[in-house]
Each structure stands twice: as structure tokens, then as C-alpha cells.
């Protein structure tokens, strides 16, 4: 539900009533986008990674990502060959530079991980590029 009229100079409220599966194969609740609010330089969404699930490996062409983990523990592989990794927990803020390949995985077998994701791109799903994931070697 959109409250307000994009472009009239007033505040726009977005109340997402449903989610969809995005290109990265994650459940996404669209908050702010160019399409629903008239935003020109940002997007803001709630993303859910189901228990034990991973996103498809991907990069965001031309847009930086700022992420706040609301719930859960997430392992993110990153780098050209996804050769690096970091584990983040609820309460962590992450910054992902534009174009950096990455692949988040929810480390919980029983609870979803939830994050608030902002990008400096009002049409951010149009600039997602899926990449071939390199198998993770468990050590």
C-alpha cells in the first residue's frame, strides 16, 4: 500500500503487504523504490534469508549497499572468486562496495535471517548481475 502521491512534494509511506522473490532468490519486501515513491537516488528494502538458505552469488552494478542485520547470523562470501568470507550478527551494519561479488548464507538451521538493505539506486533489481558461484570449501 502506498500512502501519498509520488512527485507532489509530500511524504510517501509504503506499507508492503506482500513479498516477492528477487533475482538473488531471496524474499524481499519492497520499501522505497523509484517505482513506488518517486525516489531518484535510493532504495530501501527488508530482505529475508530462510533458515539454511543462500542467495545466488551476485553483484550490484553501479550501486553501493548498506545493510543492517535485524535478526540472525549471516556468512557472506565475497571477492571475485568469493574467496573471502565474514560472519555478521544481528545489530551489525555492513557496507558492500558497488560491483563486489558476494553471496550471503543464513547460518541458522531453524530461524530466518532478516536485514534492512539500502542502495543508492532507486531501481536496484534492474542492476543485479548473477554470477557463477565457486563451490565453498569447508575447512
Image (cartoon, rainbow, N blue to C red):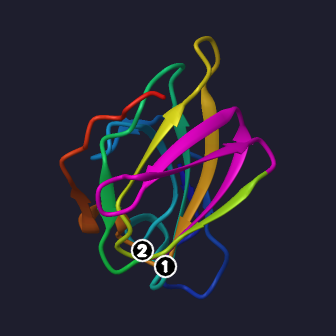
The picture places residue 1, in percent across and down from the top left corner, at 53, 48
Label 2, residues with CA under 10 Å away: few <14, some 14-19, many ≥20: many
Q: Residue at x 47, y 34 (%)?
A: 18
Q: Nearer the viewer, residue 113 or 89?
A: 89
Task: Give the residues drawn in magenta, as a range.
Answer: 64-91
Label 1, residues with CA under 10 Å away: few <14, some 14-19, many ≥20: some
Identify residue for label 2. Answer: 122
Task: Kindly give the residue lying farthest to the top in the view shown.
Answer: 110
Q: Quadrant of residue 21?
A: top left
Q: Is residue 11 magenta?
A: no
Q: Secondary structure at mark 1?
A: loop
Q: Is residue 129 above or below residue 53?
A: below
Structural distance between the alpha carbons of marks 1 and 2: 7 Å
For residue 104, the mark is none
Q: Residue at x 45, y 67 (%)?
A: 33
The picture places residue 5, in percent across and down from the top left corner, at 52, 72
Q: Residue at x 32, y 37 (%)?
A: 25
- What is the chief secondary structure element of the magenta stretch? strand
Q: Nearer the viewer, residue 126 or 12?
A: 126
The picture places residue 10, in percent across and down from the top left corner, at 65, 81
Q: Please tell me whether mark 1 or mark 2 is closer to you in this view.
A: 1
The picture places residue 124, in percent across and down from the top left corner, at 36, 67
Identify residue for label 1. Answer: 120
Q: Is residue 103 left or right of residue 45?
A: left
Amino acid at each position: 500500500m502506498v500512502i501519498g502521491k509520488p512527485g507532489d512534494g509530500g511524504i510517501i509511506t509504503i506499507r508492503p503487504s506482500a513479498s516477492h522473490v528477487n533475482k538473488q532468490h531471496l524474499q524481499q519486501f519492497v520499501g522505497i523504490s523509484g517505482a513506488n515513491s518517486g525516489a531518484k537516488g535510493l532504495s530501501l528494502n527488508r530482505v529475508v534469508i530462510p533458515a539454511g538458505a543462500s542467495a545466488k552469488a551476485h553483484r550490484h552494478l553501479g550501486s553501493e549497499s548498506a545493510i543492517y542485520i535485524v535478526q540472525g547470523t549471516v556468512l557472506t562470501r565475497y571477492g571475485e572468486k568469493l574467496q573471502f568470507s565474514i560472519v555478521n550478527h544481528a545489530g551489525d551494519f555492513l557496507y558492500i562496495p558497488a560491483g563486489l561479488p558476494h553471496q550471503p548464507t543464513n547460518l541458522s538451521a531453524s530461524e530466518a535471517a532478516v536485514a534492512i538493505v539500502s542502495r543508492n539506486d532507486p531501481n536496484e533489481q534492474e542492476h543485479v548481475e548473477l554470477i557463477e558461484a565457486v563451490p565453498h570449501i569447508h575447512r
